[in-house]
Amino acid sequence: MEVTVVRTGERYRWLVHSAATQDSAIARAAREFPDEEACRAAAAALNVAPLHAMTAIQQPDGRWRWRLWDADGHPLAESATAFLDARSCGAALLTAQRTLAGVTGPR
């Protein structure tokens, strides 16, 4: 797994994806950042994030996302994909926990 930083307009966001399939991100920053340096610093927090602090959340449109909270209770990461039901989201959350345990920071 790799972490990359992408620019969208004037904002930055990091993504976690498989090195083999860079098109399918499994996680993304829970928010955008004003500059690349701030984005990279936030991505580095994945190294110390409490992976047990992941929850599945139903969005207003009925779809589900998992979210990872930092030690201070702020959203750090979320699923890159929204899921149709809680069960699929939960399965993706477990996969993400295993994947994020091996993340070493942005490239």
Image: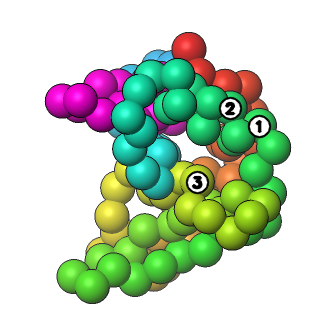
Rendered-image quadrant of the N terminus: top right
**Kind of residue at disc 1:** Asn
* Residue picked out by circle 2: 44
Dot 2 or dot 3, earlier in sequence: 2
User: Does residue 68 appear left or right of residue 27 in this picture?
Assistant: right
- Report, in whole angstroms, how far the alpha carbon at label 2 lies from the one at label 3: 11 Å
* Residue plotted at (72% across, 26% down): 104
Q: Mark 3 points at which residue?
A: 76
Secondary structure type for disc 3: strand
Mark positioned earlier in the residue sequence (3 or 1): 1
**Could you say which quadrant of the image residue 12 lies in?**
top left
Q: Of 104 and 93, which appears nearest the observer?
A: 104
Q: Quadrant of the C terminus?
A: top right
| Residue at image mark 1 | 47
Q: Which amino acid type corresponds to the residue marked 2 in the rendered image?
A: Ala
**What's the residue type where badge 3 is placed?**
Leu
Q: Do the residues labelled 1 and 2 touch (CB within 8 Å)?
A: yes
* Magenta stretch: dominant secondary structure: strand
Q: Residue at x 51, y 67 (%)?
A: 66
Separation of residues labelled 3 and 1 (CA atoms): 11 Å
Magenta stretch containing residue 83, yes or no?
no
Magenta extent: 2-16
**Where does residue 53 sit, x and y in percent of width and height?**
73, 67
- Horizontal and vertical percent for residue 23? 32, 29
Viewer-proximal residue among 2 and 9: 9
Q: Is residue 17 in sight in this rendering?
A: no
Residue 58: percent from the left, percent from the top? 40, 83
Helix or strand or loop: what does disc 2 sit on? helix
